[in-house]
Image (cartoon, helix red, strand yellow):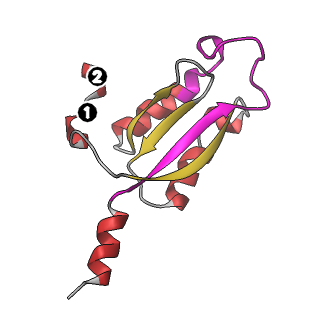
């Protein structure tokens, strides 16, 4: 017999929330991401990483955009993290929250140690 509740819980465990960043209203046009005032943004994300809220994240190489894959399972918690980002508050970055359904993975999240990369 098919257990609907068990199936739903299994699917929910495979959904991660992502924060997709792009330049905001106060982005300094003409300056690459490496020259933007994002110190407080990076510090905030380091704190979230240490608290176990971020699985991984970073900036795309060929654009001024970035992404974080979060260890949160609902939109409300992701929204709170995004709204408290200093760069979002200062409108240097804008953020879009989108769920990601994990179809496959090559390693357990515990194997990702950002300090060793």
Q: Which residue does the image show at 24% across and 20% down from the upper left?
A: 116
Q: Is residue 94 left or right of residue 77?
A: right
x and y percentages locating residue 60 in the rendered image:
53, 24
Report the side of 57 relative to 14 (left or right). right
Q: Kindly state the secondary structure of the residue where label 2 is placed.
A: helix
Q: Residue at x 73, y 34 (%)?
A: 91
- In what element is the residue under mark 1? loop
**Residue positioned 25% across, 84% down in the render:** 3
Tell me where residue 19 sits by quadrant: top right
Q: Is residue 14 above or below residue 4?
A: above
Q: Marks 2/1: CA distance?
A: 9 Å
Q: Residue at x 32, y 71 (%)?
A: 9
In magenta segment, residue 97: no
| Residue 87 numbered mark, or none | none
Q: Quadrant of residue 24?
A: top right
Q: Is residue 42 above or below residue 5?
A: above
Select label 2 or label 1 by which is in front: 1
| Residue 36 within the segment the image draws in magenta | yes
Where does label 1 land, which residue?
112
Instruction: Determine whether label 2 and label 1 are within 8 Å by CB.
Output: no
Quadrant holding the C terminus: top left
Q: Is residue 24 above or below residue 74?
A: above
Residue labelled with disc 2: 115
> Which quadrant would the N terminus be assigned to in this image?
bottom left
Q: Does 56 sit above or below residue 6?
A: above
| Disc 1 packing (10 Å; few <14; some 14–19; many ≥20) | few
Q: Which residues are magenta?
A: 14-41
């Amino acid at each position: 017999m098919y257990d609907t509740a068990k199936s739903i819980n299994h699917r929910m465990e495979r959904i991660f929330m992502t924060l997709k960043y792009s330049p905001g209203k106060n982005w300094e046009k003409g300056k690459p991401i490496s020259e933007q005032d994002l110190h407080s943004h990076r510090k905030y994300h380091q704190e979230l990483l240490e608290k176990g809220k971020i699985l991984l994240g970073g900036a795309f190489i060929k654009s001024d955009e970035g992404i974080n894959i979060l260890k949160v399972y609902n939109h409300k918690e992701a929204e709170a993290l995004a709204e408290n980002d200093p760069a979002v508050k200062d409108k240097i970055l804008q953020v879009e929250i989108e769920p990601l359904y994990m179809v496959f993975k090559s390693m357990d999240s515990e194997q990702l140690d950002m300090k060793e990369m």
